[in-house]
Image: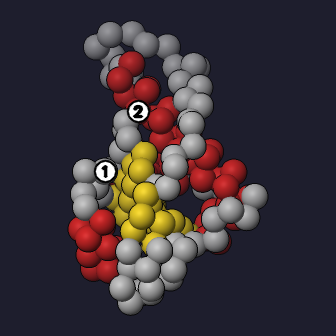
């Protein structure tokens, strides 16, 4: 898969959010880190009543879900404002599931692919290799 110059990679897990951009060419990507916007993690699924040992999510899971939702809100805002036009999302499976529920139509239009992998500690080379292998 060719990764056009300017493609933004959102690399996410339950706690981290990295946002490199391809500053290289399609055939020879060079991912450079961008400033990650401040996230507002306010969606803590307040409608869920938490009772111990009943299968309800704990505080840690609610915080991770809120993080994924905040990342998606940020990416939606940037695509709506035409600040992102080519996007790859790589997130751990649970975060990606939460994110997919909230993709705006403009984000879907910008999306090259989304992958369910935990890669927040991966190098740029590893990220490019995984994305290319997925196509």
Q: Point out which mark residue 97 bears.
A: none
Q: Which residue in the protein does label 1 denote?
A: 120
In this view, the residue in front, 134 or 86, is: 86
**Residue at horizontal 27%, vertical 79%?**
133
**Residue at horizontal 58%, vertical 20%?**
47
- The crowd level at tag 2 (other Cα within 10 Å; few <14, some 14-19, many 20+) is many
- The crowd level at tag 1 (other Cα within 10 Å; few <14, some 14-19, many 20+) is many
The quarter of the picture where the C terminus appears is bottom left
Q: Nearer the viewer, mark 1 or mark 2?
A: 1
Separation of marks 1 and 2 at Cα, in angstroms: 14 Å
Its colouring scheme is secondary structure
**Residue at horizontal 43%, vertical 58%?**
33
Q: Which residue in the protein does label 2 denote?
A: 64
Q: Earlier in the sequence, mark 1 or mark 2?
A: 2
Task: Tally the numbered discs.
Answer: 2
Q: Quadrant of residue 130?
A: bottom left
Q: Residue furthest bottom?
A: 27
Q: Quadrant of residue 43?
A: top right
**Residue 45 seen:** no
Q: Secondary structure at mark 2?
A: helix
Q: Position of residue 42 (x, y in %)?
A: 59, 26
Q: Secondary structure at mark 1?
A: loop
Q: Residue furthest top?
A: 51
In this view, the residue in front, 20 or 88, is: 20
Q: Position of residue 67 (x, y in %)?
A: 47, 35
């Amino acid at each position: 898969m060719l990764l056009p110059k300017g493609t933004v990679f959102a690399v996410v897990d339950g706690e981290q959010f990295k946002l490199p951009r391809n500053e290289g060419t399609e055939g020879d990507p060079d991912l450079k880190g961008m400033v990650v916007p401040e996230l507002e993690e306010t969606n803590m699924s307040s409608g869920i009543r938490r009772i111990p040992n009943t299968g309800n999510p704990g505080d840690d899971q609610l915080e991770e879900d809120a993080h994924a939702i905040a990342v998606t809100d940020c990416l939606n805002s940037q695509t709506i404002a035409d600040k992102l036009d080519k996007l790859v999302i790589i997130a751990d499976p649970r975060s990606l599931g939460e994110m997919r529920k909230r993709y705006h139509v403009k984000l879907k239009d910008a999306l090259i692919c989304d992958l369910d992998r935990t890669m927040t500690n991966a190098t740029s080379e590893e990220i490019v290799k995984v994305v290319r292998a997925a196509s």
